[in-house]
Image (spheres, rainbow, N blue to C red):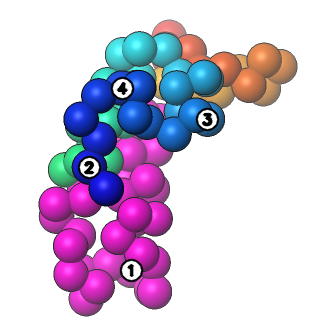
Amino acid sequence: MFYRTLSELPENVREHLPKHACEIYMKAFNSAWEQYDKPEERRSNASREETAHKVAWAEVKKDYQKDDRTGNWKKKE
């Protein structure tokens, strides 16, 4: 699974992240998808997809934080 456009991202990502954060997510996911293609490169028994999603969320969290009230993500101040 490789994302070509932002509209292909999972619904929970598209609905709650601003466009720039979606772009970060997609770029990080795609990079991790390529990097962790072999099971021995992943931690525990995580699937390739699970690993790529974890990497993508970690990248988003560097610049964005979740608003606990609305559930949406906003740029860190």
Q: Amino acid at mark 2?
A: Phe
Q: Is residue 11 left or right of residue 47?
A: right
Q: Amino acid at mark 1?
A: Arg
Q: What is the magenta segment's predominant secondary structure? A: helix
- 53 in magenta: yes
Residue on which the image places disc 2 = 2
The structure residue drawn at horizontal position 40% and vertical position 63%, both measured from the top left corner, is: 49
Q: Is residue 24 left or right of residue 76?
A: left
The structure residue drawn at horizontal position 36% and vertical position 16%, both measured from the top left corner, is: 20
- Mark 3 / mark 2, whichever is N-terminal: 2
Mark 1 element type: loop
The structure residue drawn at horizontal position 35% and vertical position 70%, both measured from the top left corner, is: 48
- Mark 4 / mark 1, whichever is N-terminal: 4
Residue on which the image places disc 1 = 43
Cβ–Cβ below 8 Å for labels 3 and 2?
Answer: no
Quadrant for residue 63, please give it.
top left
Residue on which the image places disc 4 = 6
Foreground mark, 3 or 2, reads 2
Residue on which the image places disc 3 = 12
Residue 60 image offset from top left, x and y in percent: 42, 34
Q: Is residue 36 left or right of residue 13?
A: left
Residue 52 image offset from top left, x and y in percent: 36, 58
Residue 70 image offset from top left, x and y in percent: 78, 17
Dot 2: within a 10 Å radius of its alpha carbon, few (fewer than 14), some, or many (20 or more) residues? some
